Image (cartoon, rainbow, N blue to C red):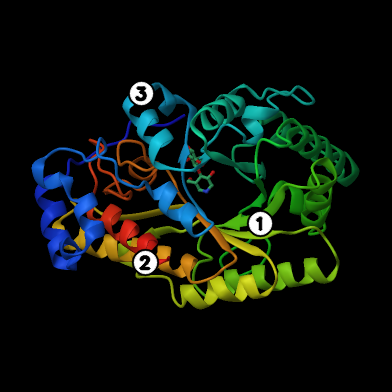
Amino acid sequence: MRTPARRTRIRAAGAAVSAALLLGLAATPAAHAGTADETGKTDQARPTETLGKLAKKSGRYFGAAVDNPELADTAYADLLGREFNATTPGNGMKWYATEPQRGVFDFTAGDEIVDFARANGLKVRGHTLLWHSQLPDWLTSGTWTADELRSILKNHITNEVKHYKGKVFAWDVANEIMNEDGTYRENIFYKTIGPGYVADALRWAHAADPKVKLYLNDYNVEAIGPKSDAYYQLIKQLRADRVPIDGFGMQAHLALQYGFPDRMPQNVRRFADLGVDVAITELDIRMILPADAAKLAEQADWYRQVTEACLAVRRCVGITVWGYSDAHSWIPAVFPGEGAALPWDENLHHKPAYAAIRAALQQAH
Ligand code: 9MR
């Protein structure tokens, strides 16, 4: 499924130190905890507070997504289990994995991640019940009436949500359902059932687990613009119609070359003001390779800004990075020539972004 990524090595130690100095981070106590790269060693053995513990102090989580094969990378899995207090399966709970044949459910992959999370004290975000991508062939190749597809969707949601009842605290019920211009994406559900499928999906998920938090989730919604406006209006309407909707997930797959999302702090706040939670669900900040000290410093500053945008709003409940090390990132395979998107480098050494996140979390309380 994942093509071998073309990876450009980053001279992490030198770059990390100079970028941290550029940012003035080395002068703060937070930076001391995160500058072990100076010695070429990680500071993971030191009794320092993890991102998860720091986030928890302000009642939030700091998580990292994980794909099942990555659990076999023991150094990676160990650090995931120690540093974070939440995780999201990168692929294991998607429709192709969980209902590979119609009505035949397989929760092996998702269960593996839930078991890992429980063993390490991490909460789990469920991702995702409904998406236009990574659907099983039987579903995409079939011809369905609206009633048939409604019944397929209801069955899928009901089975999966019941299976993970009490094991995930939130679900991305519907993922990436809007176009950039704020119109509905013409996925199989929209085309066959019409826009009402979103409210139906939320109601079915709620019926299967009345306690789990139900989210809509998308990318390019961190800025105020047509796409986030569409979600703002939809969530407002869903709430007016008493449809169970608890949260809005901003994926935050950002890229330095496109600029920081316009008015992100105000955008986070306006969704919270609608009466729903907000979460940063898939954060990564890619750059055009090769990475250098200036780009890593800018990336660190963006990680700080995103963290602060969440911390500034009581209802922004947590941040999840989409993987935590450049060793396991979806970016290079999908955006050739881009990468270095995460706070740890390929050798599990901290990048300047790590110290920037720590500093932001420490200032929150
Ligand atoms: O991280 C996931 C990667 O392993 C898959 O190959 C990819 C398939 O599209 O999906 C990735 O995760 C996506 C997430 O489910 C939804 N938002 C975008 C993420 C990156 O593509």
Q: Amino acid at mark 3?
A: Thr
Left or right: 326, with 136 as reference point: left
Q: Residues within 10 Å of mark 3 (few under 14, many from 20)?
A: few
The residue lying furthest to the right in this view is 147
* Residue linked to disc 2: 363
Residue 216 numbered mark, or none? 1
Residue beneath the point at 57% across and 26% down = 115
- Name above or below for residue 286 compared with residue 130: below
Q: Indicate which disc, 3 or 2, sits on the residue closer to the N terminus.
A: 3
Q: Residues within 10 Å of mark 1 (few under 14, many from 20)?
A: many
Left or right: 82, with 60 as reference point: left
Q: Amino acid at mark 1?
A: Leu
Could you say whether the residue bearing mark 1 is in a helix, strand or loop? strand
**Are discs 1 and 3 less than 8 Å apart at CB?**
no
Q: Which quadrant holds the C terminus? A: bottom left
Residue beneath the point at 47% across and 32% down = 67
